[in-house]
Amino acid sequence: MAAKLRAKPAENLAWHPPCSLQHGQRLGGRVEDLLRKLGFSVSLPAESHLCCGSAGTYSVLQADLSKKLRERKLKHLAHLAPQRILSANIGCIQHLQSGTTMPVQHWLEFLDEAMRDR
């Protein structure tokens, strides 16, 4: 698989580990490790273990708190100066994207693009 990927060394990727992956499924660290093994530069923001504020219906039922959590998460992500933010949860991706102009996408979508660019 690594031979099919076109790693862009200059591209700095930020990884947002969603709660569903790191707390629910207890798979924290696996995606970012895989991306690094495939040659990508991946950074985690400060407080990466905290929720981005999406949390399913939470973003609707607790909108103000949800926005505060999103802004806090985006501040930490922006500190990394990434070209894009990757995650594994569509709710997180949509929630984060609604607060930034920086591209936010699913890590599998990113890998698909990297393979097609080859």
Image (cartoon, helix red, strand yellow):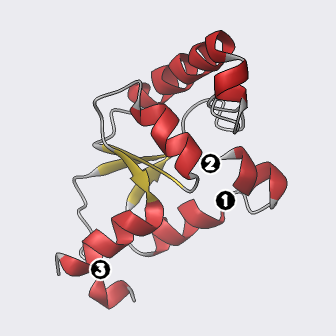
The kind of residue on which mark 3 rests is Leu
Q: CA distance from mark 2 to mark 3?
A: 22 Å
Q: How many marks?
A: 3
User: Is the residue marked by circle 1 packed among few (<14), some (14-19), or many (20+) residues within 10 Å?
Assistant: few
Position of residue 64 measured from the top left corner of the image (x, y, whole percent): 63, 10
Q: Which residue is mark 1?
A: 29
Q: Is residue 50 left or right of residue 16?
A: right
Question: Which image quadrant for residue 58?
Answer: top right
The kind of residue on which mark 1 rests is Gly
Instruction: Please tell me whether mark 2 sits on a helix, a strand or a loop.
Output: loop
**Residue in the foreground of this view, choosing between 47 and 20:** 20
**Residue in the foreground of this view, choosing between 54 and 80:** 54
Residue mark closest to the camera, 2 vs 1: 2
Q: Which residue is mark 2?
A: 17
Q: Is residue 64 left or right of residue 77?
A: right
Q: Earlier in the sequence, mark 2 or mark 1?
A: 2
Q: CA distance from mark 1 to mark 3?
A: 21 Å
Disc 2, disc 1: CB below 8 Å? yes
Position of residue 87 measured from the top left corner of the image (x, y, whole percent): 52, 51
